Image: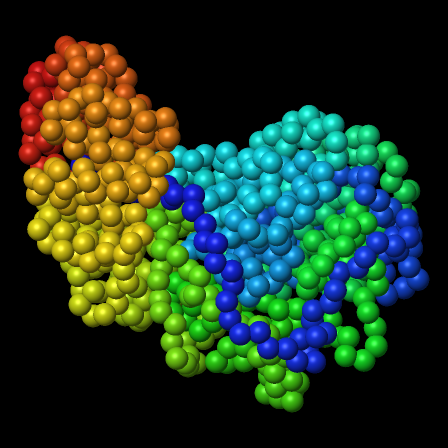
């Protein structure tokens, strides 16, 4: 069968609004501040000193929102950082730069949801990069500005912001063409470089005749850090900062385009979160919420034909700023109200007086959702930062910006005060709206370093569950992924065995270890790992589905069928185990039931290329070449980089007598996925049959050298014999 590896997710979103109790206290009242309304033509930007007229509030301007993924504030030149960022430095000199700006989450999707909706995570309900969808009826900057006559376009660089997650709501154009590839190639093309994103964004902007709102997302500073020339050489000792410098370089033409229009453009530049770079033991982001990952750059400026002349060095604001303040600020700049949003316009001074201490909420829940570790939530109150964990933390960021001195014990009263403010916030159960994610989504996010698992919520968490005590486990999990991506699967296995020895209930480690065994052809070992996890009570439905897929693919269909049937009993089951069930039916010779199962997948998701590939395979087995060709051709159209779709089409083409077309399809399949051994076998043997031994030889050698013996032992012996004859 063709579905040993799974396909992209259906584009579906939950329409369920966030649930949970809503409790308010005096502390929460200070947190939730109404957005500013329209006012005078010139806006005063407050920075703790005499205000300076800087931005013109007018409805007749465009809006450019730039989000740079994984950008630490202290990386930029204007923030005193080591990266050369002349374009963003000039923008800061033309506007206002906020020194103390913060995100509300430390991974991409929740942070962008807050930026676009103006809501906290407990309000919009997205808490991680997978398992969540922004409802179709959400009110976003795009929906609000489109209602005001703005053309709306989004141009995103990487898979965590794929339109299937729902952030496309309100956009006339949502350009996420960063490579919807299939199979192992997903590990390398899940993003597109900044210059490519800027090019399509500029083309769209230049085609607009009326006011426009453009959101441009750039992903380059995200790990793995591989800046292009000449930035790779210039920043050989710090490739992260080389990525930042390259991103600034790529932004230059976009900022010039924004300034060249007939209308002025209100520009906002920020990041979704920062990057650990080893601080507090965190290499990347997502585990903790220290300033390395929670603090973000934020620049507001107005550029273009009628914008006011700014001071040469801009304004530096020490006021606290938050992601939830971005939407009200944009609306205020356009003289539009921001009803019901918790943030405030940054174009107005912060409210003063008693009870007005600026507050902000933040969270880092990925490790809790995926590994069962303690959930991390906290609040910022002025310059005090409280982190609610079994081992609570309190920092005075004014005196201790590096968060080296935990004051939770020494200032216990202040810690209790902030803990009470946090407890008074509305509650959003992160498990409540989480949906089962397809394996294709999990694999693509894993390729970017986001490790998705499944772990139930606990009644209580102890110090042993505190992520501070488990940072070394997090490092080991990431190290295992790195080793696998570098072709060192055996070393990665040893890493995961060590993780399982220390944390036997960590389902993610069992699933990764099983996948590693499967990837090198150790089928029985892969099944044994998942079986042991299941028997020990450490297997979620996702792990059970993985086990069912392995059983079905390895010929143990009678064991796979009852396991998978139990997983798809719901009215709207997860698609991956449903596809695997169809494979299991086909493997045990029940073609009719297999066809009905794949057709059910297509009823739930008409664009599911994996189901079409499997449908085509069953039609081939039944001898219905016309139906098989239709299924494979449609799969190729939907997923042109699917190796399996091209391979299946090649089988039909050969059966129809078109050898050249078949050879072309198999060649393409092997180019897309060198580990598609069925396509490699077909290509090699049919080239031999055609008498083209010179072309066949490297494919024969590759198959004999790389095909897993556990699955292809007979074929390897056969082609090894063919090679011996050719060499004579």
Residue closest to the eye, 162 or 198 = 162
Residue closest to the eye, 327 or 413 = 327
Q: How many marks?
A: 0
| Applied colour scheme | rainbow
Q: Is residue 560 above or below residue 473?
A: above
**Residue 181's x, y, as percent?**
39, 34
**Residue 653's x, y, as percent?**
21, 17
x 86%, y 34%: residue: 305
- Residue 237 as seen in the image, left or right of residue 306: left
- Residue 358 as seen in the image, left or right of residue 475: right
Query: Is any part of residue 728 visible from this angle?
Result: yes
Residue closest to the eye, 509 or 717 = 509
- The answer to which image quadrant residue 8 occupies is top left
Q: Is residue 239 above or below residue 533?
A: above
x 90%, y 50%: residue: 42
Q: Quadrant of the N terminus?
A: top left
**Residue 223's x, y, as percent?**
50, 48
x 70%, y 53%: residue: 327
- The answer to which image quadrant residue 255 occupies is top right
- Residue 68 as seen in the image, left or right of residue 135: right
Query: Is any part of residue 5 visible from this angle?
Result: no
- Residue 427 as seen in the image, left or right of residue 528: right
Q: Quadrant of the C terminus?
A: top left
Q: Is residue 683 above or below residue 385?
A: above
- The answer to which image quadrant residue 477 occupies is bottom left
Q: Is residue 469 above or below residue 323?
A: below
x 32%, y 66%: residue: 506
**Residue 496's x, y, as percent?**
30, 60
Residue closest to the eye, 165 or 15 = 15
């Amino acid at each position: 069968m063709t579905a040993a590896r799974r396909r992209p997710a259906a584009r579906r979103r939950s329409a369920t609004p966030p649930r949970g109790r809503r409790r308010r206290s005096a502390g929460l009242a200070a947190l939730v501040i109404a957005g500013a309304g329209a006012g005078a033509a010139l806006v005063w930007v407050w920075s703790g000193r005499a205000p300076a007229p800087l931005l013109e509030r007018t409805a007749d301007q465009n809006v450019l929102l730039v989000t740079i993924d994984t950008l630490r504030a202290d990386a930029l030149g204007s923030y005193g950082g080591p990266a050369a960022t002349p374009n963003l430095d000039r923008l800061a000199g033309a506007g206002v730069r906020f020194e103390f700006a913060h995100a509300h989450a430390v991974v991409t999707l929740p942070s962008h949801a807050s930026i676009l909706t103006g809501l906290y995570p407990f309000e919009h309900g997205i808490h991680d990069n997978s398992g969540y969808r922004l409802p179709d009826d959400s009110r976003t900057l795009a929906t609000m500005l489109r209602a005001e006559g703005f053309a709306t376009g989004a141009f995103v660089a990487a898979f965590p912001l794929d339109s299937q997650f729902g952030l496309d709501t309100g956009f006339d154009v949502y350009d996420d063409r960063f490579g919807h590839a299939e199979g192992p190639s997903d590990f390398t093309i899940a993003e597109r470089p900044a210059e490519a994103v800027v090019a399509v964004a500029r083309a769209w902007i230049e085609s607009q005749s009326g006011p426009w709102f453009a959101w441009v997302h750039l992903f380059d500073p995200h790990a793995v850090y591989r800046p292009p020339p000449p930035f790779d050489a210039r920043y050989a000792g710090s490739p992260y900062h080389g990525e930042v410098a390259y991103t600034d370089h790529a932004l230059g033409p976009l900022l010039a385009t924004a300034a060249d229009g007939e209308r002025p453009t209100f520009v906002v530049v920020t990041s979704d979160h920062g990057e650990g770079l080893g601080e507090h033991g965190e290499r990347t982001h997502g585990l903790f919420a220290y300033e390395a990952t929670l603090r973000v750059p934020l620049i507001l400026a107005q550029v273009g034909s009628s914008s006011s002349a700014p001071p040469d060095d801009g304004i530096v604001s020490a006021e606290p700023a938050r992601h939830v303040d971005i939407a009200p600020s944009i609306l205020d700049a356009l003289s539009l109200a921001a009803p019901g949003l918790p943030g405030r316009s940054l174009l107005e001074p912060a409210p003063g007086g008693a009870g007005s201490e600026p507050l902000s909420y933040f969270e880092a829940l990925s490790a809790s959702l995926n590994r069962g570790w303690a959930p991390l939530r906290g609040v910022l109150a002025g310059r005090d930062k409280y982190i609610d964990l079994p081992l609570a933390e309190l920092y005075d960021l004014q005196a201790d910006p590096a968060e080296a001195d935990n004051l939770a014990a020494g200032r216990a009263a202040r810690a209790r005060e902030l803990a009470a403010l946090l407890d008074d916030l509305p509650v959003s159960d992160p498990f409540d709206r989480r949906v089962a994610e397809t394996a294709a989504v999990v694999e693509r996010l894993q390729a970017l370093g986001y490790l998705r698992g499944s772990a139930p919520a606990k009644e209580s968490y102890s110090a042993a569950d505190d992520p501070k005590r488990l940072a070394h486990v997090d490092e080991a999990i990431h190290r295992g992924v790195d080793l696998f991506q570098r072709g060192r699967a055996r070393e990665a296995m040893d890493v995961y065995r060590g993780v399982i020895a220390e944390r036997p209930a960590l389902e993610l480690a069992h699933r990764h270890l099983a996948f590693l065994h499967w990837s090198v052809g150790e089928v029985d070992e892969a099944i044994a790992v998942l079986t042991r996890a299941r028997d020990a009570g450490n297997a979620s439905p996702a792990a059970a589905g993985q086990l069912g897929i392995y059983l079905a693919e390895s010929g143990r269909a009678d064991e796979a069928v009852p396991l998978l049937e139990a997983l798809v009993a719901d009215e709207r089951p997860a698609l991956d185990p449903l596809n695997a069930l169809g494979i299991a039916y086909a493997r045990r010779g029940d073609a009719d039931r297999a066809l009905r199962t794949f057709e059910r997948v297509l009823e739930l998701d008409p664009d599911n290329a994996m189901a079409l590939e499997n449908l085509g395979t069953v039609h081939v087995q039944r001898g219905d070449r016309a139906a098989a060709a239709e299924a494979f051709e449609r799969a190729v159209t939907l997923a042109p980089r699917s190796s399996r779709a091209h391979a299946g089409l090649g089988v039909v083409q050969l059966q129809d007598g078109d050898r050249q077309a078949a050879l072309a399809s198999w060649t393409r399949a092997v180019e897309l996925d060198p580990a598609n051994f069925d396509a490699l076998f077909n290509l090699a043997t049919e080239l031999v049959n055609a008498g083209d031994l010179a072309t066949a030889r490297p494919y024969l050698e590759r198959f004999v050298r790389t095909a897993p013996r556990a699955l292809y032992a007979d074929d390897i012996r056969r082609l090894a014999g063919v090679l011996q004859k050719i060499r004579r």
